[in-house]
Image: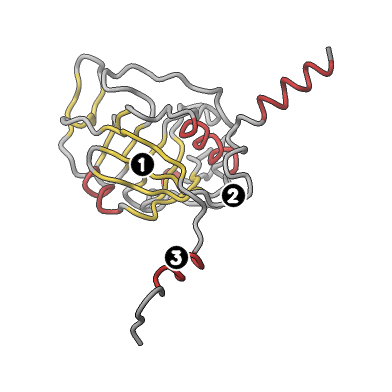
Amino acid sequence: MLCLLLTSHSANAAQDGSHIQPDNFYPRVKLETTMGDIVVELDRTRAPRSANNFLRYVDKRSFEGTIFHRIIEGFVVQGGGYDEEFREKPKFPPIINESGNGLKNDMYTIAMARENDPHTATRQFFFNVNDNDSLNPGRDWGYAVFGMVVEGYDVVDAMAQVETFYKATIGWADVPREPIILTKATVLPPFSPTTEQSATNDGDTQP
């Protein structure tokens, strides 16, 4: 019985996202949306639980078909939790809040959304579209940053400026009038500056 329990525990642990590019501390994920593509670089060194949690939703293709349901210009672009009919998507158990990791909720960072309880983050995330000091930890828990946008800044900017409205049927404010859909999320091959530089230097070179 003990062997079975240990095997089961190991299998569950292996599916927490840490099995995805396990030797890559800064995995990159491409988010394809109806407004364009965004690439985020995750930080496993400072936010391992949050980064791995995000990766497992990507690995399960669970972000595909979700919407960015809450947008406040000059504040956040939030999504990852609902489909186009505003039905909540299945989620893994909540993770521990890593807001004390030293990463700040600065412009173009990606962070975990949560409820009032600090340890309730599951699958929703948001892009900071300002330096949001109010979301950093102080006397209370903050919101855990686990990476940053490295490509597609213009897409994030455009998202932040879309028209929003109060959706009376569900009682939510700040809902985009035209749905913004996350159509595909893909873990990219490990980033290699040396490889990219070699490819750039193929053929004729300029002084």
Specify the amino acid type for callout 3: Glu
| Residue on which the image places disc 3 | 196
Instruction: Kindly check if marks 1 and 3 are in contact, taking CB atoms under 8 A apart as contact.
Output: no
Q: Is residue 125 above or below residue 47?
A: above
Please, what is the three-letter code of the amino acid marked with disc 2?
Arg
Type of amino acid at the residue the image marks with label 1: Leu
Q: Would you say 141 lies left or right of 177 here?
A: right
Q: Residue at x 21, y 47 (%)?
A: 158
| Cα–Cα gap, marks 2 and 1 | 22 Å
Q: Quadrant of the C terminus?
A: bottom left
Q: To which residue does mark 1 refer?
A: 31
Point out the tag, 1 or 3, that comes first from the N-terminus. 1
Instruction: Give how far apart the Cα atoms at labels 1 and 3 are.
Output: 21 Å
Specify whether 50 is left or right of 71. right
Name the residue beneath numbered marker 2. Answer: 46
Check if mark 2's residue and mark 3's residue have beta carbons within 8 Å: no
